Amino acid sequence: MADSRQGGPLGTGRNTRWWATADNVDMTLPEITPVITTINAQPQTVTVDLARTAIIIIDMQNDFCAKDGWVDHIGGDYSADRAPIEPLLALLPKLRAAQVPVIWVNWGNRPDLLNMPPNQIHLYKNSGEGVGLGDPLPSNGAPVLQKDSWAAAVVDELKPEPTDIMVDKHRISGFWDTPLDSILKNLGIRSILFAGCNTDQCVLHTLTDANFLGYGCIMVEDLCATSSPDFCIEATVWNVKKCFGFVCNSRDVAAALPA
C-alpha cells in the first residue's frame, strides 16, 4: 500500500527507513506488523519474527555444485554439494511469499585478486601449480570463482529472483570484508536461516560470525551440504546446537510459515 504522507523515505529497509519532509525528518521506526511463528528446532524450539528474518544461501555455485566446475576438475564429489537444490526449490517460493529476504552469498573474486593474500590463494592452489582462483577451467575457460563468470554463478536450477539480494565474498566467512552485515542491519534483520555449501566450512563460519555479531542463527540442515567426511557434518551440527544457535529441517521452516 502506498504511503499517503508528504515527503519520502530515506533508506530501503522497510523496518528501518526514516521519513523526510521539507520541515522534518522522522527517525522513528516504521510500524511493521510482526509475523511471529515458532520453528521446531534443536536443542529448543525457536520463536522468530518473520518480518525480521532472512535466509542466507552460501556458495551454491557452478564451481562447487556443477559438472566441469572447479570441484569436479580437482576430482571432488560435486554431486554431494547439490543435495540442497531440491529442498531449496521447495522452500524458497514460500519464503518469498512470506516476504522473507533471500540473500545469496557467493565467492566472487576480483579479476586481479588484489584483495586476496597468499594464504587465501593457497587454499585453491596449495602446490603453486594447477588451476586455482582466477585460472581458466580446462573444460570451458571460465576463471575459477571470478565475479560474473560462469564458475561463480549460482547453479541454473536455483536461478535467483530479481528481488533477491546478491553479496560477493572472498573468504570462507561471508561477513569478512563484505557489505553483508550492513545489508542485514538496513533490512532490520535479527534472525537468519542458513543454507548452502559447504556445511563445515563457508556455512559454519558465516554462521559463527553472525552469532558473534548478535544475530539469531538457525541452520537448516537439509539445505546444507558438503563433500567432507560425515564426521565433519556431525561436528558442525553438534557445535551449532551447543554454541552458536539452532538446527532444524526445511520442513520445520515450511510448517511454521503463514498459510
Image: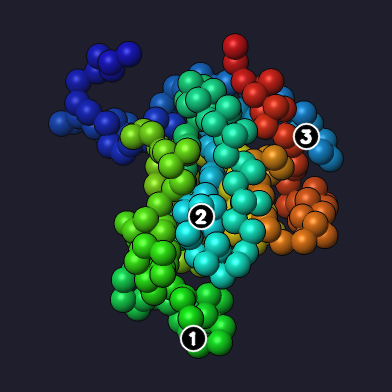
Of helix, strand and loop, which one carries label 2? loop
Distance, label 2 to label 3, CA atoms, is 34 Å
Asked whether the residues under the numbered discs 2 and 1 touch, taking CB atoms below 8 Å apart as contact, a structural biologist would say no
- Looking at the image, residue 43 sits to the left or right of residue 214; the answer is right
Which sits in the foreground, 139 or 142? 139
- The x, y position of residue 22, in whole percent, is 15, 31
| Image quadrant assignment for residue 31 | top left
Of helix, strand and loop, which one carries label 1? loop
- First of labels 2, 1 by sequence position: 2
- First of labels 2, 3 by sequence position: 3
Distance, label 3 to label 1, CA atoms, is 45 Å
Q: What type is the residue that disc 2 sits on?
A: Lys
Q: Which mark is residue 129?
A: 1
Which sits in the foreground, 66 or 19? 66
Asked whether the residues under the numbered discs 3 and 1 touch, taking CB atoms below 8 Å apart as contact, a structural biologist would say no
Which sits in the foreground, 94 or 24? 94
Residue displayed at 46% across by 75% down: 132
Residue displayed at 46% across by 66% down: 170
- The x, y position of residue 256, in whole percent, is 67, 22
Q: List the residue tagged with mark 2.
A: 67
Q: Is residue 30 above or below residue 16?
A: above
Distance, label 2 to label 1, CA atoms, is 22 Å
Q: List the residue tagged with mark 3.
A: 41
Q: What type is the residue that disc 3 sits on?
A: Ala
Q: What type is the residue that disc 1 sits on?
A: Glu
Q: Is residue 76 above or below residue 181?
A: below
